[in-house]
Image (cartoon, rainbow, N blue to C red):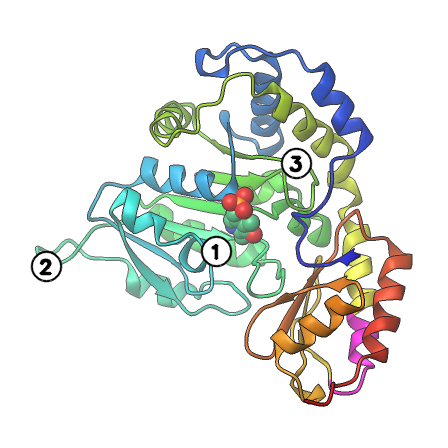
Amino acid sequence: MIDLRSDTVTKPTEAMRKAAYEAEVGDDVYGEDSTVNELEETVADLLGKEAALFVPSGTQGNQIAILTHCSPGNEIILQEDSHIFLYEGAAASIFAGVQTRTMKGERGAICPEELVSAIRKDDIHFPETGLICLENTHNKAGGAVIPIENMMVIAQIAREHHIPIHLDGARLFNAAAASGIGVAKYAQLTDTVQICLSKGLGAPVGSVIAGSKVFIDKARKWRKRLGGGMRQAGILAAPGLVALRDNADRLSEDHDNAKLLADGLAEIDGIEIINRVETNIVLADVQGTGMTADAYVQLLKEQQVLANSFGPHSVRFVTHYDVGKGAIKKALSIAASLTKQPN
Ligand SMILES: *Cc1c(COP(=O)(O)O)cnc(C)c1O
């Protein structure tokens, strides 16, 4: 199988398994797991934040950030195709009791003028705007890098209105690899950040949220309330440290492979590439093949290539370290050989 469904499907490397085996552990709810502490300090340093917190998933990290920043009845501003809005099961309204206000956005980037007009004035009729959420890279926009200039303008607006910003940086390291702008430069423009260790970085489990010491102290309590307080979690944190050490600097290989894949797919009759491929995500429109995305994905699967249906006619391919250049070429020759099956 050539599995291009997501960068979450990577299997831990030998070095990660060895690190898990050898990890020094303790009870992390007591703050006594030295490997978790090392991971949290490492990520805080990388992102230029005071403190960080290891959490089981990106979704929990984002939700803890919303719970910590907001009060029930607040409104949060986010892009209409963001992960928090589309793919987290309305958790923000269920847990934090906040209402969402969505912005259109250009390749995932929120328009500053639209943002300004969405920020609530002090009025008895209105909720308070409690948080602005950004996502970089932007998944639904095809791994688009949100330009740092856009984030700078938004940070300025947020500062003027005393509204915090949370960055869903599940793939922030991909943004950094593609733009050459370090992760701390992006993080500096936001109050809090969530990064996934289990996406392109390839660790088996986990995310880290980072922010001020005061924020992380409160977030730690929310993590406990949500049942995310883990015990000898160093077993999970150790592969995360290896992921940061070994894999952050190789993400551009995934980006090169995504470009190779996109260029090859574009030459196949009936397939058009939808996104400007900047990172590790390729979105292909397959309508010209006469197939729906579901049918196309099924046909690919029969030939041992896995991808995700991402809309009625769009298919998402994600590159990662378990799929090398050779496998990409093989997937392309399989895709080129596919034709619509008679009904
Ligand atoms: C995957 C992802 C998440 C959630 O991470 P999980 O670990 O799957 O919960 C959040 N935001 C973005 C942009 C993602 O791609």
Classify 149 as above or below 114.
Answer: above
Left or right position of 71 against 57: left
Q: Nearer the viewer, residue 6 or 52?
A: 6
Classify 153 as above or below 228.
Answer: below
Looking at the image, which residue is at 68% across and 48% down? 9
> Does mark 1 have its CB less than 8 Å from ligand 1?
yes
Secondary structure under the numbered disc 1 in the rendered image: helix
Q: Residues within 10 Å of mark 2 (few under 14, many from 20)?
A: few
Check residue 242 for magenta coloring.
Answer: no
State the image quarter where residue 86 is shown: bottom left
Q: CA distance from mark 1 to mark 2?
A: 29 Å
Image quadrant where one finds the C terminus? bottom right
- Tag 3: amino acid: Pro
Give me the disc on residue 125. Answer: 2
Which is in the foreground here, disc 1 or disc 2?
A: 1
Q: CA distance from mark 3 to mark 2?
A: 46 Å
Classify 332 as above or below 188.
Answer: below
* Labels 1 and 3: the sequence-earlier one: 1
Secondary structure under the numbered disc 2 in the rendered image: loop
* Labels 3 and 2: the sequence-earlier one: 2
The residue segment tinted magenta is 262-270
Disc 3 marks which residue?
204
Q: Nearer the viewer, residue 164 or 34?
A: 34
Disc 1 marks which residue?
83
- Tag 1: amino acid: His
Looking at the image, which residue is at 73% across and 74% down? 299
- Tag 2: amino acid: His
Q: Residues within 10 Å of mark 3 (few under 14, many from 20)?
A: many
Q: Nearer the viewer, residue 184 or 209?
A: 209
* x and y, in percent, of residue 200 in the image: 69, 46
Visible residue check, residue 131: no
